[in-house]
Image: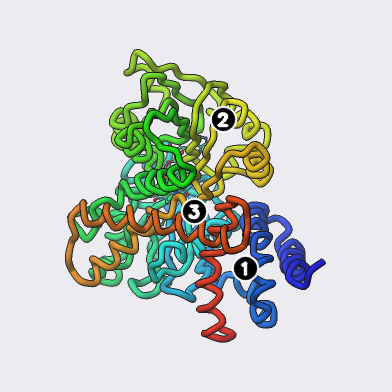
């Protein structure tokens, strides 16, 4: 076993010993560490500084109580977290997730991914994530407001425009960011750079709402082009029907492809004539309904319960945009059987490790989450820039910068893939390209 390999193994063994129950965190970290062997072989100084042990340990992990009252007068207590993982290249940056499945392990996996994703954007932002096991589904606006106010009562001690800048993720969109911003302002005064994803009337950036979905398609377009192919005329399976999925469907359609599915946690819609993103947006973003209702409104659409990844239909490209580990090995086998040549991840870690191995075995070209979905956080960083200079850029200016950033991310991943002879492994390429900048910054700053 090489020195680099045995070092990586010892860091992984330590994680397993210290946090045996943090399975999502382990999955995210081990996937990254396993791809860093060739880099460590060329940089023994990283091993000497025990850099990986520093990288996998959050600088700070805060857990707190979030008490709130429902409309019927009952009292409830949820758990809140903010994991400030790494500030080597900039202030902590990353979303907040509100979903009953949120645990410390989930927040740590997302925070860890955010370190390298944010580095890949080329912008000066460190990695963080937060959230709560609160379930916003079925809650009234007043209940969500009271929850957000209680959550921010504690979170506000730990964040700031140059310290830690949260944003949205699953269950946190414009409504929640508005309530969180109002609560922060009441306690600390107006500081518009403290959150991103804000409303356009109080410091939000044009194109932030669309950024992750649009960015996913800009990245995918670059990846497909690099194989000598085009998106025009491609049939696409999308999962999810939230922020990322909706704007991925819009941009894919504008680029001449046809999206034939979308889904939520109950089931999926199949529309062979092409999903209309405006109807998805109306149902999910405006009415906060279920995707089943799409089939009631569109004659060509059918609704089925279950996972869209178990649905057998021919298509060319898969864009999972729902949640972690939504695709397992068997479903990855079906993706290959159905003829998909490409898979780019809009969600964070939607493919489990066996699924990724199956893509590779079947020649499916794979665009990993930390590269493919970096558009959201990239535009968040552009929102921070606009807040600092007290200006608002046009939609076109932000969208053009997003486009360039996503192409640059693909090019960086491809360059690392070539440099280390990885045979079109853009996942390892993205891990390496993201890691190299963070590692250099950490080394330069010493043991901190
Ligand atoms: N919003 C953003 O800017 C970014 C989001 N992401 C990731 O994208 C994914 C989706 O996030 P958003 O669209 O923001 O959240 P969202 O809350 O707007 O939508 C999530 C959607 O996924 C569906 N969903 C949840 N669990 C599911 C399951 N098991 N099967 C099928 N559908 C399911 C929900 O019904 C909902 O329609 C998450 O993994 C998130 O971490 C990544 C980068 C940035
Ligand atoms: O815009 C942000 O800061 C958060 C984006 C995010 O949570 C993600 O990239 O997963």
* Distance in Å between CA atoms under marks 3 and 1: 22 Å
Give the vertical position of 84 relative to 229 (above or below): below
- Residue 276 at what x, y percent from top left? 32, 27
| Drawn side of residue 188 relative to residue 23, left or right | left
Tell which circle, 3 or 1, labels the residue nearer the N-terminal end: 1
Count neighbours of disc 2 (C-alpha within 10 A) and say few if under 14, some if 14 to 19, many if 20 or more.
Answer: many
- Name the disc covering residue 132, or none: 3
Circle nearer the viewer, 3 or 2: 2
Quarter holding the C terminus?
A: bottom right
Q: Residue furthest right?
A: 1
Specify whether tag 2 is near ligand 1 (CB below 8 Å).
no
Q: Ligand 2, what quadrant?
A: bottom left
Circle nearer the viewer, 3 or 1: 1
On the image, numbered disc 2 is attached to which residue?
309
Q: How is the image coloured?
A: rainbow
Of 25 and 395, which appears nearest the observer?
395
Quadrant housing residue 435 = bottom right
Specify whether tag 1 is near ligand 2 (CB below 8 Å).
no
Asked whether the viewer can see residue 22, the reply is yes
Tell which circle, 3 or 2, labels the residue nearer the N-terminal end: 3
Q: Residue at x 65, y 36 (%)?
A: 362
On the image, numbered disc 1 is attached to which residue?
56
* Distance in Å between CA atoms under marks 2 and 1: 32 Å
Q: Residue at x 42, y 30 (%)?
A: 234
Residues at circles 3 and 1 in contact by the CB criterion of under 8 Å:
no
Of 352 and 362, which appears nearest the observer?
362
Count neighbours of disc 1 (C-alpha within 10 A) and say few if under 14, some if 14 to 19, many if 20 or more.
Answer: many
Circle nearer the viewer, 2 or 1: 2
* Distance in Å between CA atoms under marks 3 and 2: 27 Å
């Amino acid at each position: 076993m090489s020195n680099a390999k045995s070092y990586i193994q010892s860091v992984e063994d330590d994680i397993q010993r210290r946090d045996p129950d943090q399975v999502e965190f382990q999955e995210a970290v081990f996937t990254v560490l396993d791809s860093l062997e060739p880099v460590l072989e060329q940089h023994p100084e990283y091993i000497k500084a025990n850099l990986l042990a520093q990288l996998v340990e959050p600088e700070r992990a805060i857990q707190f109580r979030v008490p709130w009252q429902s409309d019927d007068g009952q009292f409830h207590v949820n758990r809140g977290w903010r994991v400030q993982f790494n500030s080597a290249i900039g202030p902590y940056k990353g979303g907040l997730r509100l979903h009953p499945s949120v645990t410390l392990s989930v927040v740590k996996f997302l925070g860890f991914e955010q370190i390298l994703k944010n580095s890949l954007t080329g912008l000066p932002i460190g990695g963080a994530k937060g959230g709560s096991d609160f379930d916003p589904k079925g809650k009234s606006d007043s209940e969500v407001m009271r929850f957000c106010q209680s959550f921010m009562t504690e979170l506000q001690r730990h964040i700031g425009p140059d310290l830690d800048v949260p944003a949205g993720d699953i269950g946190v969109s414009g409504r929640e960011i508005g309530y969180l911003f109002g609560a922060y302002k009441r306690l600390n005064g107006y500081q518009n750079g403290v959150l991103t994803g804000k409303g356009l009337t109080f410091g939000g950036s044009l194109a932030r709402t669309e950024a992750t979905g649009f960015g996913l398609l800009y990245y995918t377009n670059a990846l497909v082009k690099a194989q000598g192919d085009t998106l025009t005329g491609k049939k696409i399976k999308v999962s999810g029907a939230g922020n990322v999925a909706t704007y991925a469907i819009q941009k894919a359609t504008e680029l001449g492809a046809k999206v034939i599915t979308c889904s939520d946690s109950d089931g999926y819609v199949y529309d062979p004539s092409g999903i209309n993103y405006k109807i998805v947006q109306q149902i999910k973003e405006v009415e906060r309904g279920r995707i089943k209702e799409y089939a009631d409104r569109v004659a060509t659409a059918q609704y089925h319960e279950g996972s869209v990844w178990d649905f057998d239909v021919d298509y060319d490209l898969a864009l999972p945009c729902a949640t972690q580990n939504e695709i397992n090995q068997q479903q990855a086998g079906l993706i290959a059987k159905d003829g998909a040549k490409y898979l780019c991840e809009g969600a964070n870690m939607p493919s489990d490790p066996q699924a990724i191995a199956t893509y590779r075995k079947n020649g499916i070209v794979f665009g990993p989450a930390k590269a493919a979905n970096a558009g959201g956080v990239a535009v968040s960083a552009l929102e921070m820039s606009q807040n600092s200079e007290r200006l608002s850029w046009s939609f076109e200016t932000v969208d053009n910068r997003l486009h360039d950033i996503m192409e640059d991310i693909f090019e960086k991943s491809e360059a690392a893939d070539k440099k280390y002879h990885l045979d079109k492994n853009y996942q390892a390429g993205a891990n390496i390209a993201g890691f190299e900048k963070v590692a250099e910054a950490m080394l330069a700053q010493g043991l901190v």
